[in-house]
Image (cartoon, rainbow, N blue to C red):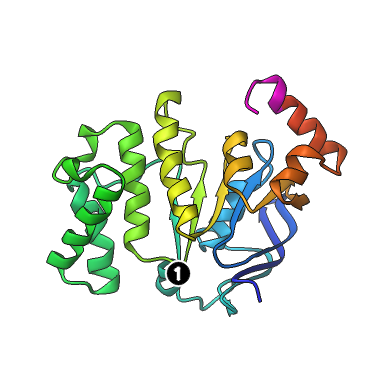
Amino acid sequence: MAFIEVEGLQKNYGPHEVLKGVDLQVDRHQVVTLIGASGSGKSTLLRCLNALETIDGGTIRVNDDVVSGPGVNLNRLRRKVGMVFQSFNLFPHMTVEENIAVGPVKLLGEPRDAALQRARELLKRVNLDHRASYYPDQLSGGQQQRVAIVRAIAMRPEALLLDEITSALDPELVAEVLNIVRDLARDGMTMILATHEMQFAREVSDLVVFLERGRLLEAGPPEQIFGNPKEERTREFLRQIIEAGRL
């Protein structure tokens, strides 16, 4: 049984169909990467998985619990499935360590001192322990995004969703953030990520999913999707990526 199961997922914004019956299965410790052109539905799919968007059809299960539709315990879901966004969404009035500790204290009931201590330990893992008492506006974009990832990990999620987490960064800051994701993958964190970093997707993924206009057009291991895609539209997309020098 897959850890995350998506069946017939539909999402509309008024008359516009954004997701058109997506099926997806993600096993524990698997890294699944969503690729596709802008507007293909990658971010919407991630937001539906974390109940940030209501769905218009289909079912989402996490560890065999239905987490879509009315009556979902959102706090319980978001303790299982964390999310990191394009924008860092750090609280500007809190220090770095306070940003990380606030969730465990308020939602998990951890003692404040213990949560702050764990925040500092997690920051050390990403080489930011010397910035624990800084405020977000005193950090670079890459540092803020690393803090955002640590904040999600501090909630002890069973899976992590990452939505274009390098898209707001200057090119020289991208590598430091992707290195954290590589470390998480090596540690066995279940992850679903949307990215335009094709070489990174090829390296880190167990499964690559190509979305096209709200449909899952093709899925397979990276060597198949990047080396021998079956669908003409996938081949066309990758040709454009190669021509742009991004693969």
**Can you say whether 125 is above or below 239 in the image?**
below
- In x, y percent, where is residue 23? 73, 62
Residue type at the position of mark 1: Lys
Q: Quadrant of residue 170?
A: top left
Residue 136 visible in image? yes
Q: Which residues are magenta?
A: 241-247
In this rendering, position of residue 31 left or right of residue 21: left
Magenta-drawn stretch contains 244? yes
**Can you say whether 162 is above or below 175 in the image?**
below
Would you name the residue on which mark 1 appears?
80
- In x, y percent, where is residue 37? 68, 36
Residue 212 visible in image? no
In this rendering, position of residue 149 left or right of residue 55: left
- In x, y percent, where is residue 26? 63, 64
In this rendering, position of residue 13 left or right of residue 99: right
Name of the residue lying farthest toward the front: 186
Q: Nearer the viewer, residue 182 or 5?
A: 182
Q: Quadrant of residue 140?
A: top left
